Image (cartoon, rainbow, N blue to C red):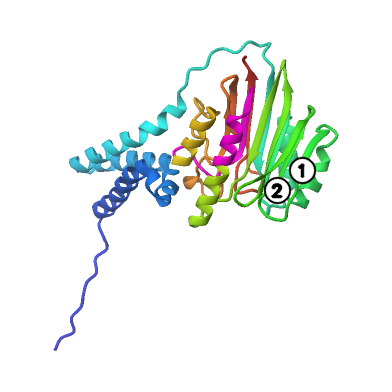
Amino acid sequence: MWPVRLALRPPDLTGLLQAAATVTVVFSLATLVNSWHRFLELFSHFRLQYLLVALMLTVLFAALKHRRWAMLMLAVTAINAVPVLPWYFADRSEIPSSAARAQILFANVNSGNSNTQALLELIETENPDLVVLHEVTDLWATAMKAVQTHYRHRHVVERHDNFGLAVYSRRPLLNVDVLASPPLDLPSLVFRQALGDATVNYVTTHPIPPIGKLGFDARNEQLDDIGERIAALDGPTVLIGDLNTAMWGHHYKKLVSETGLANAREGFGIIPTWPRQIPFAMIPIDQCLVSDDLAVLDIRSGPPIGSDHLPLIVTLALIR
């Protein structure tokens, strides 16, 4: 008997594109209802990627003259464009030159990162009024002593894990409170600072990554607690930090609804910040939220500092 040989043919280009299109359709639609399950919320953070992939597939199917697939992916492109494109457009009124301003540099430095010099050089270059850091260990607390001549006002909560916090400021810090945020008693900082003729509330918190059900629930409980505390504050308010959620997640939207704060990114784009080592997969989980008596003059990501996060640099102006 002659041996039977099976010829395994690799999938053709059209088959690969159709498989990619099917995956894109499923994730684009399923994550629209991400409040249904934690897996859906995790995948909702990649809304920008779904938009770009859907647009690319639309062009490829059109070029290959697969009209029905091209029309399907055009519809999926539109579905993803709705939550993405508005971030690039916003009405911004002209701010008087006399308005009091503050520049904030935020960085999750990564507790395993030893490249402290990169951050010090960035601080020297940007010369911000306020520096807020996450994942501060004893190494980073020691390294930051180099800036204490210019940033005489500081509060440091160094830890041996990923949840140390620190604030360095040119202006005095008022009423600094270190909160033990539930459910894991991770530290959050609340402090106040004069800006023009007002006193601004600053809050920074770093919830645990939403990995697994326990991590997901813990992140949400910490965000809920911070939201309640912010809702009780009077006056201009800034929440800044690695919140471990992008803007399309259900629990991010809940936080914004409870606090009345607006994302500083509005009108400036998505500005992904993590994970820096995988550019195509980067998502915006480092956030700056502000009350309506503060205007955002600029927000942008900074250069790499050895961390898996890019820094955020935000310039605010007091408008009331």
Looking at the figure, which quarter contains the C terminus?
Answer: top right
Helix, strand, or loop for circle 2? loop
Q: Position of residue 44 (x, y in %)?
A: 41, 44
Helix, strand, or loop for circle 1? strand
* Label 1 vs 2, first from the N-terminus: 1
Q: Position of residue 142 (x, y in %)?
A: 81, 48
Looking at the figure, which quarter contains the N terminus?
Answer: bottom left
Instruction: Identify whether 304 is placed above or below 229.
Output: below
Q: Is the Cβ of the residue at disc 1 closer than 8 Å to that at disc 2? A: yes
In the current view of this chain or complex, which residue is farthest to the bottom? 1
> Of 30 and 131, which appears nearest the observer?
30
Q: Which residues are magenta?
A: 224-249
Give the image quarter of residue 130: top right
The alpha-carbon separation of the residues under discs 1 and 2 comes to: 8 Å
> Of 128 and 194, which appears nearest the observer?
194
Q: Amino acid at mark 2?
A: Gly
Task: Write down the residue under mark 2.
Answer: 164
